[in-house]
Amino acid sequence: MQADAPFWKALVFDEIDEVDIEKVTAAFGAFEIVARGRRASGNCPDCGHYSERVHGFYQRRLRDLPLGERSVVILLKVRRFVCDARACPRRTFAEPFAQLTCPYARSTTRLDRILERIGLALAGWAGARLAAQLGLGAGRMTLLRRVMDLPDPQFSTPRVLGVDDFATRRGHAYATVITDGERHHPIDVLPGREAAPLAAWLRAHPGAEVICRDRAGAYAEGAALGAPNALQVADRFHILQNLGQAVEKCVAAHRDCLRTAVRPSGREATGTQAADREAGPPFTVLPTGRRAERMRAHHALVHGLLREGMGLRAIARHLGWGRHTVQRYARAARWQDMVTGRRTRSSHLDVHQSYLQRRIDDTDGVITIKDLREELAVRGHRVPYSSLRDWARSRLEWPDTPAPTAAAPSVRTVVGWITRHPDTLTEDETSQLKAVLDACPELDQTQQLVRAFAQMLARRTGADLPDWISTARAARLPGMTGFAHGLTTDLEAMIAGLTVHWSSGGTEGAVNHIKKIKRQLYGRAGFELLRKMILLQ
């Protein structure tokens, strides 16, 4: 194989000019490459003395990247030179191979870099499986050791910092992540979520001008101690979250008003409600909500196009829907069937449908399910009451069916109506919200406070926050009073959060990425390994 040495040199040691190939053998599914250094002399690493005197040789065994699905092993002959300088304590030194490998390493530098990337991307077990598929032959602990050996990334203290906590063990142990507020990238991770570690870090890294944080008192204290001149900015997301919790407490305290705000039923119902009552089965409550409204509109649209003579495929192309979706709407006689997800199936009671429908029409709907069951029993067909009841609700038409009583909206639903932007509410939701506010002046006052706070947030007029707090306190509404009082405990950070454009959004994104890293490590990584993975990914 000596004649092929230039070929193997160009193939394996491309751009590495410090070794020569002596021999290449292929056996047992692996390539063994015998190589030696090209240096005839060297400089002592301690004193720098030049020496050409060779003391001896030894051989290093290095794993390299696989070649053609075969592993590659480099048997590297290394010279040891003698240092002749009398003042130098070192007597011999080894020939260096800076381009190929590191001292004491058992693999090449390029293989180490690949393993580092796999370890950072996939961590232990998953990385080991990928390494095995690639023919690299590295175990999970090897990959994790490669990650731990990497140096921490260097950074200069950014002008804007983001601070937030995350759980290393939910409910038991927590840590603090510090991010660059402009690049949204983690720059350090601290153990715990107390004020002292954050204050010490800020003192060791001066220069922060803005600190975005949540409303935790420990971070407020740590930022004040470590960077007293920095502007603290409370996160708007957490402020809105606390506002939503306050509104929920207020609505829950006035839940009795929700029952009196239910829309009228019976002969007073008009429009779509009346049509739904006439088409719906008796003794059932009509589905409500945004999904029901969407299903109703889609069902009417598909059946309107069918009445115009369009086919199912033409409707699917026109609306950009799947053919099977259009087919389900077309087969549904009523839009309620699409909401419940039930399909019309054949039943052994279908043979009695004409007789039972005639009996209902003859009695003007006065006959009951119990009476129909007894008549079927006389005719020799005994069926369970519940089976006949469920079948009759979906297959028979009952004249003058009492209108179903609409259920009162839940507390969560009303909170959503109050806290959402008015433009996102449907007509039905707007009318229901108006009925609730008319029935409860306290909730109407709550909505006005929420709208004023939302405008203050959207327009960045944080200077109006003290006046809003005074108004909320004077209203004495459950939940809202406590929320207003909580704002006064951290007033300067709240005003800054409603004024400047900086926020903790990037830090929240970093915390979300940290959760993905924790899942990769199956919760068994120590703090140092977890910190290394967070900073280097």
Image (cartoon, grey):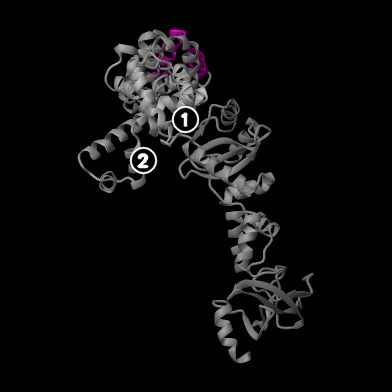
Compared with 275, 504 (above or below) is: below
For label 2, the residue is: 328
Which residues are the magenta region? 462-488
- How many marks can you see? 2
Relative horizontal placement of residue 8, taking residue 76 as reference (left or right): left
Going by the numbered disc 1, the residue's amino acid type is Phe
Counting from the top left corner in percent of width and height, residue 133 is at 61, 65
Task: Tell me the crowding category of disc 1: few under 14, some 14 to 19, or many 20 or more residues within 10 angstroms, Cα based.
Answer: some
Relative horizontal placement of residue 394, taking residue 143 as reference (left or right): left
Going by the numbered disc 2, the residue's amino acid type is Arg
N-terminal of the pair, mark 2 or mark 1, is 1
Camera-side residue of 515 and 375: 375
Counting from the top left corner in percent of width and height, residue 363 is at 35, 14
Task: Tell me the crowding category of disc 2: few under 14, some 14 to 19, or many 20 or more residues within 10 angstroms, Cα based.
Answer: some
Compared with 278, 36 (above or below) is: below
Q: What element carries label 1?
A: helix
Camera-side residue of 498 and 509: 509
For label 1, the residue is: 237
Counting from the top left corner in percent of width and height, residue 197 is at 64, 35
Which residue appears at 66% of the width and 49% of the height? 529
Visible in this render: residue 500?
no
Counting from the top left corner in percent of width and height, residue 517 is at 59, 47
Relative horizontal placement of residue 398, taking residue 34 as reference (left or right): left
Which residue appears at 56% of the width and 35% of the height? 164
Residue 35, quarter of the rendered image: bottom right
Q: Main secondary structure of the magenta part?
A: helix
Camera-side residue of 274 and 484: 274
